[in-house]
Amino acid sequence: MTADLTINNLHVTVEGQEILKGLNLEMNKGEVHAIMGPNGSGKSTLANTLMGHPAYHVTEGEVWFKGQNILTLAPDARSRLGLFLAFQYPSTIPGVSVSNFLRTALNARYQQPGPADSGNGQGEGKGLSMRDFRDMLKSRMAMLKMDPGFARRYLNDGFSGGEKKRVEILQMAMLQPEIAILDETDSGLDIDALRIVSEGVNQLMSPNLGVLVITHYQRILDYIKPNRVHILLNGRIVLSSGPELALELEERGYDWVKEQFGQSALGPGTAA
Ligand SMILES: Nc1ncnc2c1ncn2[C@@H]1O[C@H](COP(=O)(O)OP(=O)(O)OP(=O)(O)O)[C@@H](O)[C@H]1O
Ligand SMILES: [Mg+2]
């Protein structure tokens, strides 16, 4: 029995430097997994690689999802297959409203079935009518306690840090992925926003959704409760355990992990 998402011996280079050095990770839909790790350990590299960002070169390894090695697929095909990434640093698209962006993204996700699509019951092949789209957008924005006027604003143009993060989760709520990676979605959110966004993610949780939460802090995990917590250090998952591991890290930091598992206590890119 293999996991819904299986990452096997993943090696990734960025700008000629190896960042991921044989990363293994398995997760199932219906589960929440957290990845924690020092700055520069490769967390965003993993997220970007899973989505097929062209700057990240896979030199070895496989990522299995829905019966195929997704590393051979283009980013849009991965999205259609049900993968989603909420970016650590969402980009701005001036001239494209939030509403238009989401409608375009939804149509792209559902109009053409992905290769070897096993069907996820979300109505691929059919576009969403304008009316259905608006109803869905309204209800998801209400769930995330967003002002409806947001939908008309240009994507992330002049948005505050927290507003950008909330729009990322709105995207997730609209696209209904099967594996969602949240890369430091908690950073920049105020205390109320963190709770609202987390509750939104929890409402989206189902046996058909797995969430990978990348975070530095325990706090988001108080709301979005992880089944497993993994430590990424120097391009590898060096330790996986239950939710108590996040509490231990909060208390003790990473020195003990580096002592136990690091070849050196220095991250990649740091002068030795
Ligand atoms: N596009 C890129 N160009 C150059 N170097 C990169 C690029 N992406 C990542 N790196 C390098 O890869 C290493 C890992 O970066 P990554 O963003 O994956 O770390 P992280 O674990 O997400 O850190 P943080 O906790 O600070 O977000 C860093 O040394 C970084 O400078
Ligand atoms: Mg990062």
Image (spheres, rainbow, N blue to C red):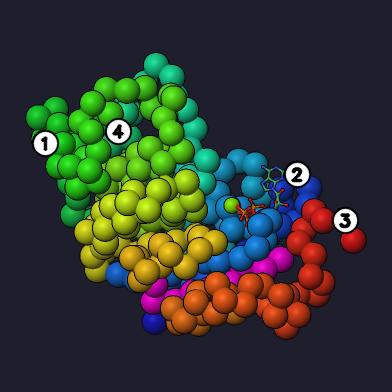
Q: Give the number of the disc on residue 135.
A: 1
Residue at 71% x, 48% y is 14
Q: CA distance from mark 1 to mark 2?
A: 44 Å
Q: Upstream in the sequence, badge 4 or badge 1?
A: 4
Relative to 51, is 144 on the left or the right? Answer: left
Note whether ligand 1 is within 8 Å of mark 2. Answer: yes
Task: Check disc 4 and report the residue beneath it.
Answer: 102
**Amino acid type of the residue that numbered disc 1 sits on in the rendered structure:** Asp
Q: Which residue is mark 3?
A: 271
Q: Are marks 2 and 4 in contact (CB under 8 Å)?
A: no
Most common secondary structure along the magenta stretch: strand
**Which of the two discs, 2 and 3, labels the residue nearer the N terminus?**
2
* Residue 39 relative to residue 179: left or right: right
Between marks 3 and 1 in the image, the one whose residue lies nearer the viewer = 3
What residue range appears in magenta?
Answer: 226-236
The image position of residue 76, as x and y in percent, is 42, 40
- Residue 45 locus on image (x, y percent): 61, 53
Residue drawn 82% across the image and 72% down it = 264
